[in-house]
Amino acid sequence: MKKIDILVLLILSIGLMSFKNDKPAYIIYNSKGKPVKYSKMLKKLAEANILFIGEYHNNPISHWMEYEITKDLYKLRDGKITMGAEMFEADNQIIIDEYLAGYISSSKFESECKLWPNYSTDYEPLITFAKDSSLKFIATNIPRRYASIVHKKGPELLSKLSDEAKKYIVPLPIKFEADSILKKQLGMMAMMSKNPVGIMKAQIIKDKTMAYFIMKNYDKEKMFIHYNGTFHSDSHSGIVKYIDKDLKVITISTAQQDDISKLDPAYKGQADYIICIPYSMTRTY
């Protein structure tokens, strides 16, 4: 064997050993469980009409990736994107619009908008990006007080709400059908609840309301990027079920494992792309 060949093999061996001993913060897999480079995933994502990014709410890698993907797709799509999220309730849309337009200060926005406790670390970067880039940011979720009515008192009571209140909910009446995926997702939660049917119906009205506001604000010239818990878009269920079937929908999910070098078979098919993160990753809360 030539010296040059031996040298090449030595360099490759050292490189492989270094990679093996590395500690990546995440690895991206496709739906079949094969590793995918970020750049290759990004090109595919740019083809979507609607992109769902499923996060773990307290995971910093989820939030960092949301920001990076949004920023890069903004460039690839020449700024033609719309943003929206589960974390913002529909009746706060006017406050979001006023803040993005520069009519009110950040302190006024934060004091009047119903923000999640981890807003400043996890969602403020997205809102700031929308503001700085003059993008729409849609509050898609049903106001929690109405989801609570469905859970605790039943959906029938929603029909008695004022016309103003109904503006923030998917048009009534709605069917509360639960597919096998939803039943499986809610299985453990339902077992710990005194009212599993109520929980399931609240989940359905959340998904249907989010889908309604996504479609209401969808512009065929723009990609709609939606941020939500994995629960709401895994297996192309949840919100995705209620999106126009003629649109190209791509989903991203999050998974956690002790060893991320190989995707656990349980996560295969969970989404078009899965961001696999070590269990030992720090939490934002």
Image (cartoon, rainbow, N blue to C red):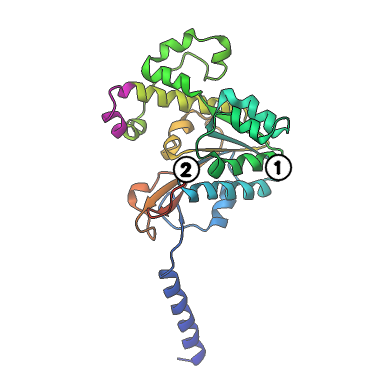
Picture disc at residue 274:
none
Residue at 45%, 91% (x, y): give it.
1
Vertical comparison of 183 with 164: above or below: below
Q: Position of residue 209 (x, y in %)?
A: 51, 24
- Counting the numbered discs, the total is 2
Which one is nearer the viewer's eye here, 33 or 84?
Answer: 84
Q: Position of residue 256 (x, y in %)?
A: 38, 50
Hey, what amino acid is under mark 2?
A: Glu
Q: Residues within 10 Å of mark 2 (few under 14, many from 20)?
A: many
In the image, the segment drawn in magenta is 187-197
Q: Position of residue 100 (x, y in %)?
A: 69, 34
Q: In the structure shown, which secondary structural element does the residue marked by tag 1 occupy?
A: helix
Which one is nearer the viewer's eye here, 92 or 49?
Answer: 92
Q: Which of the two discs, 2 and 1, labels the residue nearer the N terminus? A: 2
Task: Kindly give the residue lying farthest to the top in the view shown.
Answer: 160
Q: Nearer the viewer, mark 2 or mark 1?
A: 1
Residue tagged 2: 55
Image quadrant holding the C terminus, namely top left
Hey, what amino acid is under mark 1?
A: Asp
Our reading of the magenta stretch's main secondary structure is: helix
Residue 192 falls inside the magenta stretch:
yes
Is residue 216 visible in this depiction of the protein? no
Which one is nearer the viewer's eye here, 81 or 158?
Answer: 158
Q: Is residue 195 left or right of residue 162?
A: left
Q: Is residue 26 left or right of residue 223?
A: left
Residue at 52%, 16% (x, y): give it.
171
